[in-house]
Structures are given as C-alpha cells and as structure tokens.
Image (tube, helix red, strand yellow):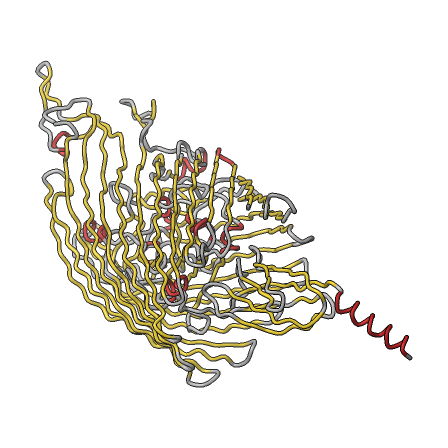
Amino acid sequence: MKKLFLLLLLTTFSTYGQQVTLYGTVSDNNNNPIVGASIYVNEIQKGTVSDIDGYYQIKLKTGKYTVKVSSLGYKTIATTVQLDKSLRVNFTLDTDSTQLDEVIVTAVRADKNTPIAQTNLSQKVLQEKNLAQDVPYLLDQTPSVVTTSDAGAGVGYTGIRIRGISSQQINVTLNGVPLNDPESHGVYWVDIPDFASSTSSLQVQRGVGTSTFGTGAFGASISLETDIISPRAYSQVSGTYGSFNTKKYSVKGSTGLLNNHFEFTGRFSKITSDGYVDRASSDLKSYYVSGTYKDDKNTLKAIIFGGAEVTYQSWNGIDKATFETNPTFNSAGAIYNDAWEVVDYYDNEVDNYKQDHYQLHFNRKVAENLSFNVAAHYTYGHGYYEQYKQDRDFADYGLTPIVINGTTIENTDLIRRKWLDNDFYGVTASALYKSDNMKITLGLAANEYDGRHFGRVIWAQYASDSKIRHEYYNNLGVKKAYNGFAKSIYNISDKVKLFTDVQFRSISYKIDGTLDYNYDYSTKDDLFFVNPKIGLFYAMNKQNSFYVSLAQTHREPNRDDYINNIDKPKAETLNDVEAGWKYKSKDLYVETNLYAMMYQDQLVLSGKIDNVGSPIRENVGKSSRLGFETQVAYKLNKMFSVNANLTLSSNKNDNYFVTELGTLKNYGNTDLTYSPSIIAGGSLNFVPVEGLKLQFISKYVGDQYMDNRNIEASKLDAYFVENVFVSYSIKPKSYFKNVQLSLQVNNLFNKKYASNGYMWGDSPYYFPQAGTNYLLGLSLGF
C-alpha cells in the first residue's frame, strides 16, 4: 500500500512538472491582430508579447495560472487557465479610449455600434501590400471604391472615388487633424508618400458618416491613425523593386517604452519610378518622427512628418486615336515645329512640392469615465510646377511687344513656374464621457489657411522688358473655419442603441489679387452650416445586427469652383438615408447596406478641365445616388477563404440643363459623371502552409460617363482586371524577428483600359493604365 501511494505521488509530481505550451492570439473586437500585447503570468512573474500576427506562446509547467493580457489603447483582462496539456487560448481586448492613441481618433471615428457603413483596416492588412503604391490603391478592395493613377501604375499622382464621389468631397483626417487641402478640398497623397508605413489603422466611412473635423463628407470619410506606442524596441528595413524601374526603400524603428514613460519612433522612405506613361517619373521622399511621454493619467505626443516630391507631369491625357495606337504617349513638355510636329521635349516639365506637418497631442484621463484631448497642428507647403510654353502673347504675361529689324514681335516661347506657398494651422479639442449606458463625445476645432499663389517667368526667348523672375500674377486665399459637434450613443436596452450627432460649421473665405496679368479678382463668402444625424443600432443576437440612420450635411465650394464659374457657386446639401444588416459567425461574415443620398446643388465633375488641367465642377440642382452595397468573407476551411464586395447603384441628375449656343437645353435625367452603376471586387485566398499566402484578386468597374449630358463620346468603358499577390513570411531563429517576401502582379491578363479621363469640348481624353506589371518586396524585422 505504501509503495502504491509513493508511486501515485511520484506520478503526480512528474505530471505537475511536465512542460506544456500556452499559445494563441490577441485581437481586437474587429478580429484584427494586436501587435505587442503583453501576456503576463502572475505565478512566475514572466511573460511575452504578441507578434505582428497577434500570436504568442509561453512554455510553462502543468498547473493553474493567472494570465494578464494588456496593450496600450485596450482594456486589460485577466483570466485563470488550467494547464494539463498544451492549450490554445485566444484573447479579445476591448478598446480603452482613454488611452491617447485611441482618443486622438475616437472623436472622428465610428465604433462597431455606430449605425453607418464602415470598413476598418488594421496595420497588418495595410503593411502586407504596402510595396510602393499609394494609399488609394491599398483601399481598392473596399466597397464602392474606384482608383486611378496619372502615371498609370499607382506611383505618383493617384486618385480615389467612393460611391462616384470625387476626392474633393471625401473628408480625410490624420490623428483627428484635417488632411484635406482647405482650398482645393483634395488630398494629394503624393505629398506624403509611403505614409501607410506609419499608419497603425485606417477607417473608411461611407455616406455622411459621423461628424468630423475639416470639410464635410459627401460620399465618404477616411480616418488614419499613426503608429501607436510600441512597448518593445524594434527596427524594420524594407525594399521593393518592380516594373518601370520602380524602387522603394524604407527604414523604420522604435525605442520601445523607456523607463515606462518615453517612446520614440522614426521612419524614412524613398520611392522612385519611371512610370508607365512616357517620362511620368516620380522621385518621392518622406519621413516620420514621433516622441511620446505617458504616465497613469497624461499622455503627450509630438509628431513631425512630411514629404518632398518631384514628378514629371502626366496630367494631359491622350485622345482616342492615340490611346488605341500609342497609349504611353505624354504631351507634357512637348516642343513642336511650325508643322506642329513634336521635335523634342522639355526635360524639366515637373511638379516640385514639399510639405511638412507638425502635430502636438495632449491627453488627460480626468477620471475612469472621462478624458479629453487637445491637439495643435501646423502644415507648411511650398513648391511649383514648371512648364515650357510656345508662342505665347507678351500681353498675357505683362510684357510689351518688341521690334527687331523693323518687325514687331508679339509672341515668345517661355518657361513659367506656378507657385504655391501655404500655411495651415489650428487646434482641435475633444472630450469623451462613458457610463454604463451612454457614450458622449464633444469636439471643437478652429483653423486658418493662408494660400499664396503666384506665377513667374524664369526664361523667355524674347525677354522684352521683364525682370529677373518676372512675376505675372499674385493672389492670396485666406480661409478661416470653426466647427464643433456633440454626438452620443445611448443604450436604450441591451440590444438597442440610439445614435445622435449634431455639428456646426462656420467658414469665411476670401481671394484677393490677380489670377493672370491685369486680371484682378476678388471674392468673399461667409457660410454657416448645421448638420444633424440620428440612427438606431439593433443587435438581435450574437450573429445578427441591424442599423438605420438619417443625416443631413452641407459643404462649401472650393477655390476652383469660385474661379471657374461665372455665377457664384452654391453650397451643397445632402440628405442621406442608410440601412444595413451585419451577420457574423465563425466562418462567415456578411454586411449589406442600402443608401439613398439626395442632393441639392451638388457640385459634380463636369468632365471639363481648366487651362492648368484642374477638373471643373458645376452645381447641378437636384441629383441622387441610390445604391446597394454588400461585402462577404467566407472561410471554406483552414486553407481557402473568399472575400467579395459588390455595389449596384443608380446615380442621376434630375433634369440636367445646360446652355448651348445661347439656348437652355434640358437633357432630362442623366447619369452623374464618373459614377459607374456596378463596382465589384473580390479575392480567392489560399494558405497551404503557415506563412505562405496566395491571393487571386479581381476588380470590375462598369461604364461611366465623363459628361453630364451622357453623349456617347464621353463614355468611359467598363474594365475588369485581375491581380495576383503572393507572400511568404517566416520567423527565423536568428538575428531577424521576421522576414517577409512579397510579389504582386497587377493586370495579370494585360487588359488595355483607362480608369479616368476628361472632355475637351466634345472630344474625350483618357488616362491609360499599365498593362501587366509587378512589384517584388522584401521586409526584414529586427
């Protein structure tokens, strides 16, 4: 009996001392992996951190343990686990918006219970395909998105439209700070190249969305959050090489959290490309530096980032005959003989611009349920685009004709630079209050933009009476804006939540000076808007939820709207109704959304461009965008999964009128420009072994018109393109923490297509996109 007892005792100790593995993943409520989460075991006072996939593992002896999981920006959780054998435990952390890195963006973002259509992209998703193409191309597989590239391959000037809405009507914020240019309303991603490398998360809201800072959202808003605090030091080196001599180099690192209070992060990137289109070269540089101090209640974060770009202009487009026979032709910089034949090209027909951003964020946790954030920001941008011009009138540049050997010379060849020099500065503030059944967010912002526009002649064949750097126009645009909002989510019951949101926006804008020589121009406009929103969110059960929302918003015209229209442009008004359903199970996710966007005086792209290539917009009275959006993600098994999205829409002018030859003509109900009725995307994903991923990606964009009259010549044909993406990542037991090799093949079947264009009179001009091309990338983590 004693021997039996001793044997049982030894067996028990042996079992208790056996080593097993606790492993799993750490993710957020959207199932996105959390990088750098701390997994701490109280009994042994040791732990580990999650990797880029949110994965962790700890070797332990069999027994009972208390495991604490924490990450900055998330609520800490603790749980007890009994380890008799190796065990997988996955942890899901709830957002703790009292942390700085969330408070920075929580004022302008929607959470999972907000009744709007939204897509959230994690850092892992963004970085996986961040080879050299710009942010719009990383969003190409989100619903209702159409992207385009002037140079044809996604490097240089790129554009994005969502639900047919142009980039001038998409609100973009970075850490809650407005990123749209206050005058043009556009976002020029080329000015901050490779910014995705410093982005920790991105949210796209479709429709009016929630209240935000900056110009109003008329089709969508995009919110980016920069890198959050890293608890551990790291460094990363990545490089890309691809078609058209495309190259990207990026170096990035963090000190990790020093003395439990300080963290510093930095990145430098350089991208160069010859472009698909002739001479459409890009030379892009960017940087990002941040420093953070934190304690139990306060966080102070300083961020400096910016970029410098020199791109050879490829803004002119090509006519239909050239598109068919010589799609890479670029007329920018062309030098013609007397027979109007191209004999040479000017070698410096470039856009040269530099932009620097400064942000300072302070957050204080006043109490467990109350916090506030204040941010000061300043952006300085300056640069020019240079153009060779032939046979120009002296008078257009403020010069007098000259007489040579008795002959009066009234025209000259010349080189001009059109300069931009602007300052944008202001402050934003937000407060967040949370209780058991309510969340309230308040926001205030004030900013000013001073935009100086001037033109200089730097060379002329006949200099006339010009001076060095002869200036032929100079004007100043000043825009002051103030806005505030109050929004709340109230739990009517455990299943029903009420969303309310109201925003005010006050704008004062004026332009003074000369637009061209002796063309004096002055305008001033003061506007005030109130934008209300309301919605309901209903969680029927763990799998199904429904939402509905009503919203109204207004938006002011931009600089070109004032300058290019004879009549003073009107502010736009949008009434937006949205309703959706979400289903989520272990292997299937489905989201559908119905929307009805009813406009008054919508400023739509006319299809025309001005004399410097900027698109001209026009008020069109009543118009509408009615649509159905759906996205599906289905996991067939451990190796195969499918993602797909589809948008079906009707986008109409209500009785489109235009004056032709002095007569007002009604074209009836026509399709809105650049608004395809079908947009679809999808990918088939195959993971045969851990670390290896293969994706076959498709994109379809239906027919769209480049003229609101819908004349046949203005039709931009539908296109269907396929891409392939392959990545292989390993975590070698060596000097490197991780290694990833990626290959992206775009336009696999060499489809000939144009994704954008414009009309010159009744003649179409196209921006052709590249045929089959590739990008090969390597990333090393230390």
Q: In which quarter of the image is residue 332?
A: top left
Q: In this view, does 491 lie above or below 363?
A: below
Q: Could you tell me residue 48's position as x and y percent?
A: 59, 59
Task: Single out the residue that lies furthest toward the bottom.
Answer: 493
Q: Could you tell me residue 591's position as x and y percent?
A: 51, 69
Residue at position x 90%, y 75% from top?
Answer: 3
Q: Could you tell me residue 131's position as x and y percent?
A: 50, 44
Task: Let me know if residue 259 appears in the view.
Answer: yes
Q: Could you tell me residue 593's position as x and y percent?
A: 46, 69
* Mark count: 0
Residue at position x 28%, y 45% from top?
Answer: 614
Which quadrant, please, contains the N terminus?
A: bottom right
Task: Let me know if residue 550 appears in the view.
Answer: no
Which quadrant, please, contains the C terminus?
A: top right
Residue 39 or 507: which is nearer the viewer?
39
Q: In which quarter of the image is residue 220?
A: bottom left
Residue 595 or 424: which is nearer the viewer?
424
Q: Quadrant of residue 90?
A: bottom right
Task: Single out the residue that lies furthest toward the front.
Answer: 2
Residue 335 or 432: which is nearer the viewer?
432
Residue at position x 51%, y 42% from top?
Answer: 237
User: Image check: 202 left or right of 440?
Assistant: right
Q: Is residue 498 above or below residue 270?
A: below
Residue 413 or 509: which is nearer the viewer?
509
User: Image check: 472 left or right of 532?
Assistant: left
Task: Single out the residue that lies furthest toward the top.
Answer: 405
